């Protein structure tokens, strides 16, 4: 069949159509499975790798492959965009550790949910926390966290929505999660999963990118947990400088049950 086609730039420059012309329609290779089709992709960052991450389709196997592939260059790339999430999260945990009274923070059990290469663990360790555990969907990312020296354990291949299969309920004093509640990564219901892993009186501290908060039902899920008396909001930091080209909200919840 013949059809007039518009100018289209495909992912491979060899496939670039240089001008509008009549040509036979042919089947082209699909984009990598972990990235949505260019026709439905929304431009969310000036940095290509970050833009690709923000356009993932949410399928765990695709997200895992994306971060496995990114692991080697991840820290350099996020440094290039002035990624401040881990330091902000650690600062909020440091501020609210007073909730634990005279307990030595070195003995507080902390879980870094979606630990990546260990950037949050590094910040937490610098603030005196020592009993830090982590997990990530990507084995390659988690392996780097495990070798960082800041974690007691760091496991890969764990889907956050199935974290209760790997960790006992109410077994952590503090859970942090930074860079996870992001479009194309986890659904807002992941908040309920993490809340069940925190001991009563413990803290759940996390970030949400602006577009995630605006475009998902995160606020409804959080409000439901609060209304049911399962947690309360004790602090929030809105429109913080998450990266050089994007803002984020940060939340501190105390689990009450």
Image (tube, grey):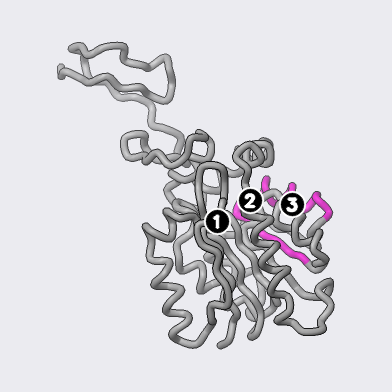
Choose mark 1 or mark 2, whichever is in front: 1
Q: Provide residue 132's location: percent of width, then percent of height.
A: 76, 65
Which label's residue is closer to the chain start, 1 or 2?
2
Residue 104 included in the magenta stretch of the image: no
Which label's residue is closer to the chain start, 3 or 1?
3
Which label's residue is closer to the chain start, 2 or 3?
2
90 sits left or right of 160 in the view? right
Q: Are marks 1 and 2 in contact (CB under 8 Å)?
A: yes
Magenta range is 132-149
- Quadrant location, the N terminus: top left
Residue at which label 3 appears:
145
Crowd class of label 1 (few under 14; some 14 to 19; many from 20; radius 10 Å)? some
Q: Residue at x 38, y 31 (%)?
A: 30
- Quadrant location, the C terminus: bottom right
Crowd class of label 2 (few under 14; some 14 to 19; many from 20; radius 10 Å)? many
45 sits left or right of 126 in the view? left
Residue 124 vs residue 38, the one in the foreground: 124
Residue at which label 2 appears:
84
81 sits left or right of 44 in the view? right
Q: Secondary structure at mark 3?
A: helix
Residue 56 vs residue 244, the one in the foreground: 244
Image height of 225 relative to 182, above or below:
below
Residue 148 included in the magenta stretch of the image: yes
Q: Are marks 2 and 3 in contact (CB under 8 Å)?
A: no
Q: Provide residue 4's location: percent of width, then percent of height.
A: 16, 18
What mark, if any, has residue 240 been given in the picture? 1
Q: Residue at x 36, y 16 (%)?
A: 16
What mark, if any, has residue 122 been given in the picture? none
Q: Secondary structure at mark 1?
A: strand
Task: Specify the quadrant of the image occupied by residue 17.
Answer: top left
């Amino acid at each position: 069949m013949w059809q007039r086609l518009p100018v289209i730039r495909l992912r491979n420059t060899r496939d670039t159509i240089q001008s509008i012309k009549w040509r036979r329609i042919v089947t082209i290779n699909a984009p990598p499975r972990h990235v949505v089709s260019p026709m439905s992709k929304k431009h969310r960052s000036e940095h290509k790798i970050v833009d690709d991450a923000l356009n993932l389709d949410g399928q765990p196997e695709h997200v895992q492959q994306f971060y496995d592939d990114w692991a080697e260059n991840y820290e350099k790339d996020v440094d290039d965009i002035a990624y401040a999430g881990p330091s902000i999260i650690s600062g909020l945990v440091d501020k609210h550790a007073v909730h634990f009274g005279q307990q030595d923070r070195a003995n507080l059990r902390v879980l870094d949910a979606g630990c990546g290469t260990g950037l949050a663990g590094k910040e937490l360790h610098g603030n005196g926390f020592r009993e830090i555990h982590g997990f990530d969907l990507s084995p390659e990312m988690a392996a780097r966290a495990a070798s960082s020296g800041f974690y007691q354990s760091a496991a890969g291949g764990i889907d956050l929505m199935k974290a209760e299969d790997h960790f006992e309920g109410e077994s952590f004093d503090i859970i942090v999660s930074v860079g996870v509640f992001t479009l194309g990564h986890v659904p807002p219901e992941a908040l309920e999963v993490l809340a069940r892993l925190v001991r009563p009186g413990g803290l759940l501290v996390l970030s949400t990118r602006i577009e995630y908060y605006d475009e998902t039902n995160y606020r409804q899920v959080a409000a439901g947990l609060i209304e049911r008396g399962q947690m309360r909001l004790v602090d929030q930091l809105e429109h913080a400088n998450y990266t050089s080209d994007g803002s984020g909200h940060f939340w501190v919840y105390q689990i009450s049950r």
